[in-house]
Amino acid sequence: MKLLLAWIINTVSLIAVPYLMPSISVSGFTTALVAALVLGLVNTFIRPILVLLTLPVTIVTLGLFIFVINGLLFWFVGSFIEGFVVAGFWAGVFGAIVYSLISWLLSALLLR
């Protein structure tokens, strides 16, 4: 039940991002559901591998390279989900930050 609620929270967060960033668009609720699921799977399986492979760069940049990884993954998911458009790399980086903040805020409010 908690996993389903987290998925819905991430979906709502993904729907809210285009209101704050015009360079990102989501065509509808179903697209947001699929994109939130794919983002969750990518962050679960691919992100740890990338973080491990780029560990030296992450250490040298004092952890700031994680923002690059998150932005690239956000942009990557936007490139193959129909109806979820991320305009470019920087839109992916800032979109991932906004998405994370909204998701964190909603989770803090609803998942106590």
Image (cartoon, rainbow, N blue to C red):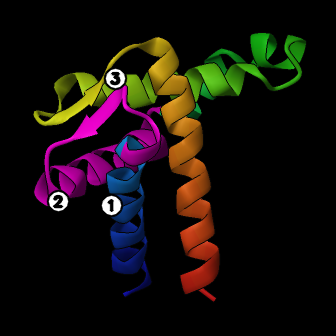
Mark 3 and mark 2 lie on one chain; the one further toward the N terminus is: 2
Query: Is 73 included in the stretch rendered in magenta?
Result: no
Q: Pick the quarter of the image with the N terminus.
A: bottom left
Q: Nearer the viewer, residue 24 or 74?
A: 24
- Amino acid beneath label 1: Thr
Foreground residue among 4 and 82: 82
Residue at 46% across, 13% down: 89
What is the C-alpha distance between the residues marked 3 and 2?
A: 20 Å
Q: Amino acid at mark 3?
A: Phe
- Tally of marks: 3
Q: Position of residue 39 (x, y in %)?
A: 36, 44
Q: Which residue is mark 3?
A: 76
Q: Earlier in the sequence, mark 2 or mark 1?
A: 1
Q: CA distance from mark 1 to mark 3?
A: 17 Å
Q: Is residue 49 above or below residue 19?
A: above
Name which quarter of the figure residue 25 lies in. Answer: top left
User: Which residue bears the numbered disc 1?
Assistant: 11
Q: Which residue is mark 2?
A: 29
Q: Quadrant of the C terminus?
A: bottom right
Q: Is residue 7 above or below residue 64?
A: below
| Residue span colored magenta | 19-46
- x%, y% of residue 97? 59, 39
Q: Tell me the CA gap for discs 2 and 1.
A: 8 Å
Q: Is residue 9 above or below residue 60?
A: below
